[in-house]
């Protein structure tokens, strides 16, 4: 039975029961009132009536008194009037006294009988009133009990199951949902939970497939690259026989392009891994100034060949919680890009400042050709490159900034560029304030 | 050095063989799967065993485990692999002496082998 049905039935029974008892009580009350009315014609008045009927009509005094009596309404005044009439009658007609006494006796008996009956009816009335309020009270109690047992308890059970589901204890199945509204809710919840589990399983499966694909792709792509690259470098070193200048040049070109292809494969796999969340950060406390210095040292060779100066300014001695290798990849990418686009003899400047929010802002500034504003968002997308590099020392894969963006995002920061044509570019990325060591700040 | 090389990809194995022989001056015996590697390693003595990570019949890790359990415990084992996830690398380093990720510079492979063997000797000493 549904809860609504049960409550409706209960309410109907309560209203019907207490209404019926109430109606009975009302009827009884009416009965009592009728008795009261009849008894209001007190015995004195009745006796007066009897007396008056016995008296001769020609007597003017009695006629006048009769008219007077009819005008009197209240019982006590009628009683007083009756007494007066009785006195008068017994003075004038002493022989009537006995019949008056008899009439009084009859009336007294009648009154007493009525009184007994009245208290009987009154007792019945009280019983009916008690029954009516009893039914009402009990009904109310049953309604509250029903709500409690069937609604609140079921809701509690449901919310417990939902909580279980939330914390991955998949005991979500309500083994036998009952035929109530809450049973419907449980069934709906079961289907919902099943759907969530199916979707999650599907996602897990897809994720698994993606990981497998990445793993196979890296093996399948890298294996031929190993032999191509290997063959080319062995040929170039001349260990298998000397080559003429033309062949050597061609082999060097093939070797360079192979290197680029290998970088591209590595970048693509990196990006795929980062984007699928398969590259957890290996966090460590890193001394920021030392980290910047080491990263730039690694790029000194590239800068020297491009005849570009590297400058490191206002690097504070702070400690940050970052993935050293990944952050190095970001900084290396930005600085090597800056070197590539810098004219000979210019400088690339790496600096650090603090945003209003307290986040660290790392900037890499060059004096290159600058980037048109419409390209400034584009270059962070995959395979999108701006103008041609001034120093094409290393051909880019078109993925470097996309990877840097993904890695900075993994660290909770953001990346961007400020630039104008002919005014150079300033690439920046942020590191959230909470990555900074509290200890270092105090010191 | 007398080296056992197990590599299923014929192109890669020839490149490595040439590198080892022409640059390093080593002698190389070539097999193309894990089962052959175990077979040969237990029958003949080598100064170094190089195993590819992914091979037919037996993977590099399986082959290495079998070679070690066959009583050949002192011969260094170096893995080559294109799978260079952290947990793969950890598995290689747990079982073998060293690990060279693919793709590698074949002209540098001898130097890398020397570096790994030197490190291992230092660790042992």
Image (cartoon, rainbow, N blue to C red):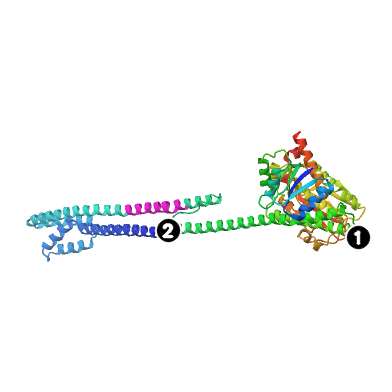
Please, is residue A196 above or below residue B71 in the view? below
Residue A246: which numbered mark, if any?
Answer: 1
Chain that bears disc 2? A
What's the magenta region?
A: A133-155
**Residue A137 appears in the picture as rendered:** yes
List the residue tagged with mark 2: A180
Say whether marks 1 and 2 touch (CB < 8 Å).
no
Q: Residue at x 33, y 58 (%)?
A: A13
**Residue closest to the far bottom:** A58
Q: Crowding at label 2, few (<14), some or many (≥20) Cα neighbours within 10 Å?
A: some
Q: Position of residue A243 (x, y in %)?
A: 90, 56
**Residue closest to the far left:** A95
Q: Main secondary structure of the magenta part?
A: helix
User: Where, quadrant-wise, is the C terminus of chain A in this rendering?
Assistant: top right
Chain that bears disc 1? A
Give SS at disc 2. Answer: loop
Q: Which of the two residues, A63 or A159, is positioned nearer the viewer here?
A: A159
Give SS at disc 1. Answer: helix
Q: Position of residue A12 (x, y in %)?
A: 35, 60
């Amino acid at each position: 039975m549904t809860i609504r049905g049960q409550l409706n039935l209960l309410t109907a029974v309560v209203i019907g029961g207490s209404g019926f008892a109430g109606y009975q009580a009302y009827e009884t009350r009416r009965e009592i009132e009728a008795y009261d009315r009849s008894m209001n014609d007190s015995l004195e008045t009745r006796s007066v009536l009897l007396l008056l009927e016995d008296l001769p009509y020609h007597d003017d005094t009695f006629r006048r008194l009769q008219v007077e009596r009819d005008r009197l309404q209240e019982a006590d005044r009628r009683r007083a009037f009756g007494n007066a009439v009785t006195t008068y009658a017994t003075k004038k007609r002493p022989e009537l006294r006995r019949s008056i006494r008899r009439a009084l006796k009859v009336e007294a008996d009648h009154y007493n009988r009525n009184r007994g009956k009245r208290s009987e009816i009154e007792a019945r009335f009280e019983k009916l009133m008690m029954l009516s309020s009893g039914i009402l009270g009990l009904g109310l109690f049953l309604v509250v009990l029903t709500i409690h047992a069937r609604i609140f308890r079921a809701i509690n059970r449901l919310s417990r199951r939902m909580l279980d589901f939330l914390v991955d204890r998949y005991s979500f199945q309500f083994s036998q949902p009952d035929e109530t509204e809450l049973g419907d809710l449980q069934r709906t919840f079961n289907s919902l939970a099943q759907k969530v589990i199916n979707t999650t399983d599907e996602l897990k499966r897809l994720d698994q497939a993606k990981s497998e694909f990445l793993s196979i792709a890296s093996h399948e792509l890298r294996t031929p690259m190993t032999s191509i690259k290997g063959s080319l470098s062995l040929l170039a070193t001349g260990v298998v026989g000397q080559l003429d200048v033309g062949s050597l040049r061609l082999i060097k070109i093939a070797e360079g392009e192979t290197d680029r292809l290998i970088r591209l494969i590595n970048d693509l796999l990196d990006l795929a891994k980062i984007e699928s969340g398969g590259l957890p950060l290996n966090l460590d406390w890193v001394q920021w100034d030392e980290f910047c210095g080491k990263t730039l040292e690694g790029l000194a060779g590239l800068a020297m060949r491009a005849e570009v100066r590297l400058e490191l300014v206002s690097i504070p001695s702070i400690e940050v919680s970052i993935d050293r290798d990944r952050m190095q990849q970001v900084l290396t990418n930005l600085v090597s890009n800056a070197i590539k686009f810098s004219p000979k003899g210019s400088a690339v400047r790496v600096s650090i400042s603090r945003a209003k929010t307290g986040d660290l802002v790392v900037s890499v500034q060059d004096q290159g050709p600058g980037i048109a504003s419409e390209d400034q968002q584009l270059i962070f997308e995959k395979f999108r490159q701006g103008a041609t590099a001034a120093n094409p020392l290393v051909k880019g894969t078109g993925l470097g900034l996309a990877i840097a963006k993904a890695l900075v995002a993994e660290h909770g920061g953001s990346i961007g560029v400020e630039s104008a044509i002919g005014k150079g570019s300033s690439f920046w990325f942020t590191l959230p304030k909470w990555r900074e060591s509290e200890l270092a700040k105090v010191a | 050095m007398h080296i056992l090389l197990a590599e299923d990809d014929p192109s890669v194995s020839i490149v490595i063989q040439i590198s080892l022989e022409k640059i390093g001056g080593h002698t190389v015996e070539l097999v193309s799967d894990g089962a052959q590697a175990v077979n040969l390693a237990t029958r003949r003595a080598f100064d170094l065993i190089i195993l590819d990570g992914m091979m037919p019949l037996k993977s590099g890790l399986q082959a290495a485990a079998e070679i070690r359990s066959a009583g050949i415990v002192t011969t260094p084992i170096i893995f080559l692999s294109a799978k260079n996830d952290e947990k793969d690398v950890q598995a290689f380093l747990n079982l073998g002496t060293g690990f060279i990720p693919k793709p590698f510079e074949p002209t540098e492979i001898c130097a890398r082998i020397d570096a790994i063997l030197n490190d291992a000797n230092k660790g042992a000493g």
